Image (spheres, grey):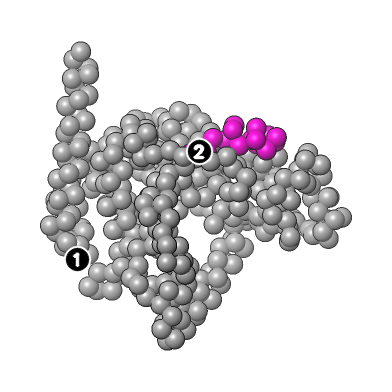
């Protein structure tokens, strides 16, 4: 879910074309959860192969990543590592939320409320270790690089952007801004028309770019106080203060400047006490565990047979469609390699 500062962030429209040639550090788990939630049948049943194994994550990863590559983007997928100890409470709460959603999904199906059923089903998505391994295997076959973060992927991706290894972080969440990423890109995997729930109309979703400096200047805060705002609202690592949303958090942080004074403020005004580890949460955002990324990434070293065997042989994907997508990718890579050789020549 991430920290809820979307209403306060300065968002600028962008396009896939304008990102051509850019290295984008993709929050892998966030992206895979998008696919698991969205690639479903009308009644909410996830996409599966003939053996009943969920394949929505593989379908999204293959077809949508191929689309990005064909448009010139250079994605590097960053996978989460070991979560900090104070994330356990959030994980447990999410598990309970999924159980409740499953119960509502089943009830909606029994009552033939299929639109409600699909909505509840999306909230039941689970990413397993096997799915993660499958995703890495598929990326290897497609010639798309990935790296393993020691802890939070968004922290690792943020440092990559800070160091110039990548242009931006791609995620639907805003946490990478708290981790200090200069640029966040949203919606690159969900562009296009989407139906508005319970309404007979569609909206067009376009990619958006959020620059950290621009947002901080607009709010009149620095990154340290942005982190404190996030803590007041609630993050993946702590519960937020009851009745304190983004706008109220901004007002509070204009009155208090430090985490210590913010803790004191909400205790007096809201009778709310933060978790005992709240300073660790703040320090985690400021100095998260990350690995230095020095190697140069390569794209296009595909193993077509490996991909076909995996997707079609093991998971019943359409071989005709998979081969067509791989051939388009191969053509794109070959054209770019030819152009690169010509550029070097001249």
- 344 versus 315 height, above or below: above
Q: Is residue 41 left or right of residue 254?
A: left
Q: Residue furthest right?
A: 268
Toward the viewer: 182 or 128? Answer: 182
| Residue 278 x/y as whole percent | 71, 51
Let me know if residue 248 is in the magenta part: no
**Secondary structure under the numbered disc 2 in the rendered image:** strand
Q: Quadrant of the C terminus?
A: top left
Instruction: Tell me the magenta residue range.
Output: 209-224
Cβ atoms under marks 2 and 1 closer than 8 Å: no
Toward the viewer: 258 or 73? Answer: 73
Disc 2/disc 1 C-alpha distance (Å): 40 Å
Query: Which numbered circle lies on residue 12?
Result: 2
Name the main secondary structure of what is drawn in magenta.
helix
In this rendering, does residue 251 appear at all? yes
Badge 2 density bin: few <14, some 14–19, many ≥20, Cα 10 Å: few
């Amino acid at each position: 879910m991430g920290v809820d500062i979307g209403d306060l962030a300065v968002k600028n429209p962008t396009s896939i074309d304008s990102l051509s040639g850019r290295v984008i550090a993709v929050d892998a788990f966030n992206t895979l959860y998008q696919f698991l939630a969205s690639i479903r049948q009308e009644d909410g049943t996830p996409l599966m192969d003939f053996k009943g194994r969920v394949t929505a994550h593989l379908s999204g990863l293959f077809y949508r990543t191929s689309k990005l590559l064909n448009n010139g983007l250079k994605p590097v997928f960053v996978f989460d590592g070991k979560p900090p100890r104070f994330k356990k409470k959030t994980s447990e709460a999410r598990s309970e939320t999924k159980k409740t959603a499953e119960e509502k999904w089943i009830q909606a199906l029994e009552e033939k409320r299929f639109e409600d059923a699909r909505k509840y089903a999306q909230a039941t998505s689970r990413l397993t270790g096997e799915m993660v391994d499958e995703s890495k295997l598929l990326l290897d076959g497609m010639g798309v690089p990935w790296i393993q973060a020691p802890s939070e992927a968004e922290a690792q991706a943020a440092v990559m952007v800070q160091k110039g290894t990548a242009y931006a972080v791609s995620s639907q969440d805003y946490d990478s801004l708290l981790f200090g990423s200069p640029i966040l890109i949203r919606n690159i995997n969900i562009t296009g028309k989407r139906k508005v729930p319970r309404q007979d109309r569609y909206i067009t979703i376009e990619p958006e770019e959020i620059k950290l400096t621009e947002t901080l200047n607009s709010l009149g805060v620095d990154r340290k106080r942005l982190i404190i705002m996030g803590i007041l609202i609630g993050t993946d690592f702590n519960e937020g203060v009851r009745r304190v949303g983004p706008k109220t958090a901004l007002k509070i942080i204009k009155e208090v400047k430090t985490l210590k004074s913010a803790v004191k403020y909400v205790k007096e005004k809201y009778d709310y006490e933060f978790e005992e580890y709240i300073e660790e949460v703040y320090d985690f955002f400021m100095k998260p565990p990350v690995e230095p990324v020095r190697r140069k990434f390569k794209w296009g070293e595909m193993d077509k047979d490996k991909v076909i065997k995996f997707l079609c042989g093991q998971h019943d994907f359409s071989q005709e469609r998979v081969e067509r997508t791989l051939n388009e990718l191969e053509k794109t890579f070959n054209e770019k390699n030819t152009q690169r050789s010509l550029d070097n020549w001249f």
